[in-house]
């Protein structure tokens, strides 16, 4: 995905890209909960040789959930910063346009 922004008036594209990354993180979380950290494959029977690994899957799931929580928090802060920057740029554009209109009037 190309996140390069050549024109600050095209920040809508950046916002859409950031929303897509956030959605991907959500899908990654769903995938890890459903498939990667599923203990069922390690507990097929009482004598399954992989059964001890199943106990560790819970720890892996917890670590991954912690990572995703931290990612969501950090990504939310980045998104808030981008939104604040967009507002600042729009305000600055309005101020410049107003000044230029006054100069030519």
Image (spheres, helix red, strand yellow):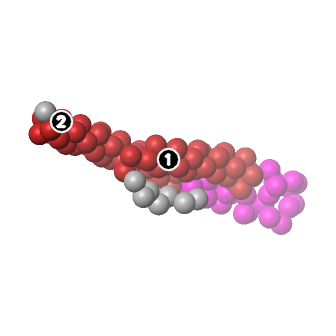
Question: How many dots with numbers?
Answer: 2
Residue 77 in view of the camera: no
Q: Main secondary structure of the magenta part?
A: helix
Query: Residue 41 occupies which quadrant of the picture?
Result: bottom right
Query: Residue 87 occupies which quadrant of the picture?
Result: top left
- In the picture, measured across the screen, residue 72 lies left or right of residue 60, that is left
Residue appearing at x 64%, y 51% in the figure: 28
* Mark 1 closeness class: few <14, some 14–19, many ≥20 residues within 10 Å: some
Tell me the residue that label 1 is attached to: 13
Residue appearing at x 86%, y 61% in the figure: 48
Which stretch appears magenta? Answer: 37-66
Q: Is residue 36 above or below residue 22?
A: below
Q: Quadrant of the N terminus?
A: bottom right
Query: Residue 105 occupies which quadrant of the picture?
Result: top left
Q: Residue 89: x percent and y percent?
A: 28, 45
Q: Nearer the viewer, residue 62 or 77?
A: 77
- In the picture, measured across the screen, residue 14 lies left or right of residue 54, that is left
Q: Nearer the viewer, residue 66 or 8?
A: 8
């Amino acid at each position: 995905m190309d996140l390069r922004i050549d024109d600050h008036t095209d920040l809508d594209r950046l916002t859409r890209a950031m929303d897509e990354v956030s959605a991907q993180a959500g899908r990654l979380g769903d995938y890890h909960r459903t498939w990667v950290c599923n203990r069922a494959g390690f507990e097929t029977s009482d004598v399954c040789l992989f059964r001890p690994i199943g106990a560790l899957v819970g720890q892996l799931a917890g670590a991954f959930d912690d990572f995703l929580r931290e990612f969501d928090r950090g990504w939310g802060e980045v998104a808030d910063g981008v939104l604040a920057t967009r507002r600042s740029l729009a305000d600055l554009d309005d101020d410049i346009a107003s000044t230029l209109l006054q100069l030519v009037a």
